[in-house]
Amino acid sequence: MNKGFSVERGLQRGRIRLQTGFLYINREDGEQYQLIEYLDEDSQVLIRNIHTQQSKIASIHQLDNVVVNEREDLSIDLSEIGDEYWNKALKKYEAIKPLLNEEQYDPTSVEAHAEKIGVSKRTLYRWIQAYNSIGSVAGLVDRKRGWSEGNSRLNKEQNELVNQVINDFYLHKQRPSIEQTIREVQRVANLKGIESPSRRTIRKRILSISEEERLRKRGQKEKAKNKFTPKPNHFPNVDFPLSVIQIDHTPVDLIIVDNKYRKPIGRPYLTLAMDIYSRMITGYYLSLDEPSVTSVAMCIARSILPKERLLLDHNVKGEWNVFGYPNKIHVDNGADFRSLDLSKSCEAHNIALEFRPVGRPEFGGHIERVIGTFMKEVHGLSGTTFSNIKQKDNYNSESEAVMTLDEFEAWLLNYIVNVYHKRTHSALGVSPVQKWRLGIFGDKDHVGCGYPQLPKDEQTLLLDFLPSKKRTIQHNGVTIDGLRYYDVALNMHINDSDEKGKSKEFLFRYDPRNIGRIWFYDPKLKRYFPIPFADQSLPDMSIWEYKQVRQFLKNKDEKLIHSQQIHDALTEMRERVERSAQLTKKARRQAQRQKVHAKSEVVIPTAIPDSNAIETVKVPTSHLLSDSEFTFGEIE
């Protein structure tokens, strides 16, 4: 194992839940702080050191959970969780789903539901607790031997007390504050001689009440009716930011040019994600290749992750403080959205993947309309194809084309953050960024939902969405589609057999844009290690190039029998492309793909490092913070 690496931490799918009054670790100094207040500026919060009582302003991205609820037995790749265990977890989730709101704290509701589905109340509570420990379906996967059941719940008297005060005091037309309600719980508990639940528990219970119930029972029935009654062309159950996002693809109405010769190479493709509540763009994916399931997965990951580095890499000044897990992703019925791998990845991170029902206007094509808005702006750029022949008229798109893919991406980013997000939206009456802030922070008439939840570990999130293969490990390494990979990390698993004596297969994930390195999941250490080509003389290449190499050799009536053929064929192909790049658009596009693949590399840990030593490798930016293309294709 490489010196300086820690194997004590594995994959982590927990979430960081930001809520005022809660305690967090500040990654900068390792001290514990209480979150005091959200500051509506650059994802900033006011925190107070619990030891020194000194307050300061910090970024939410500096905060981490004090107590890690991550289950060690789930520190594994998703593919390692068998279908039997996963399907059982999904059945548990469906059983508790009706209770994943304020009803989970109501013993009467839990008991009635337990009787309805034919399980004990204790079992139902255990499932709810397991789900809440991680915040996703993964928490419901059967535990391995030796694990405890976690923290105890409130006792019956405390539950009844909190429910009574909330129903009789908080949900009243006088509209008392949360702080007043906490004091009332403490007062009644003292009168009854009951130990009061913590302020944190009471606050959490109050915040779990839906906005509809809160408005209705606090004397605002008309507002609740107007806001939550479904209307034609209005997406139902969109009550707060990231409750639903929509994703769709489009070819961009623009001819772009290559970086070297500045000659036209065709239209790029855009995958776009939008928050229905605020109309904020949550993420995008720009590529020279046709949309695929990987386009969707990469767009989802970019939606969840912070965007500061993305703006910095493209030198775009502005703010894009949109991040966090969506509750639901709404898509059309295309094959790229119906991938089982994509569905499982979403389930693992507690994201519902929902397909648009036919003939239901209330589920409206919000994303199609915003794509239409974007393309109208693109029609003002040199090289636009417009949206139809009539609009194009005598305009020669290719001769007018001037923008490279990188230049267009910078334009797109600037348009998103500095124009679209700040312009008043006709359906909202305010700008998307104003609507987003209202949903997050609230005002005197609205209860904000607070900052969205962040992934505990970005690396786990990204690996969960990458494609994978299973292969056996031999003395010379592992072979995937004729390419051999080797590293000492494979040695302890050479010729391993399963309990039936058959050769054991291991999981490998790969970046389709650069298959010069794959990621090996070690089931014993429960972590990933990069495995390079066994023949170090082979250059990095994409799946797209490798498939062309194999076809190139086939056309020459040669069989692929050794790595030198790959090296020679790839070199010859690239030289041919370079020579013909000035002559043909297809060749220029091919050359540009190759440059984009090789261009943008960032340093990421080869394993999750400890705080004292980090050893790194370069891999392509398929982790989405700055890349502009990620070629994907299945190897036969």
Image: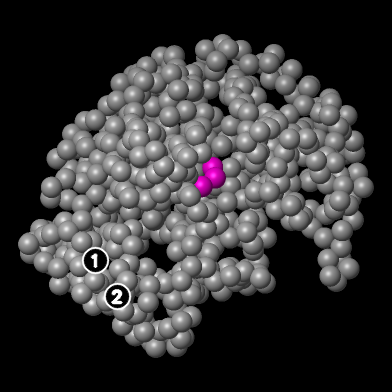
Q: Residue at x 25, y 72 (%)?
A: 189
Residue 186 has which mark?
Answer: 1
> Which residue is at the front of the view, 458 or 564?
458
Secondary structure of the residue carrying numbered label 2:
loop
Question: Count of labels shown?
Answer: 2
Q: Is residue 38 above or below residue 599?
A: below
Amino acid type shown at disc 1: Gln
**Picture coordinates of residue 413 (x, y %)?**
39, 27
**Picture coordinates of residue 495 (x, y %)?**
90, 56
State the extent of the magenta-drawn residues as a range.
Answer: 454-458
Q: Is residue 628 above or below residue 18?
A: above
Q: Please indicate whether residue 185 sits to the left or right of residue 600 in the image.
A: left
Q: Which residue is mark 2?
A: 194
Q: Quadrant of the N terminus?
A: top right
Whether residue 2 appears in magenta in the rendering, the answer is: no
Q: Residue 341's quadrant in the figure? A: bottom right
User: Is residue 247 something that shows in the picture?
Assistant: no
| Distance CA(mark 2)–CA(mark 1) | 9 Å
Whether residue 456 appears in magenta in the rendering, the answer is: yes
Q: Residue furthest right?
A: 475
> Which residue is at the front of the view, 267 or 321?
321
Q: Please indicate whether residue 417 sits to the left or right of residue 524 in the image.
A: left
Amino acid type shown at disc 2: Ile
Secondary structure of the residue carrying numbered label 1:
helix
Q: Please indicate whether residue 297 sits to the left or right of residue 526 in the image.
A: left
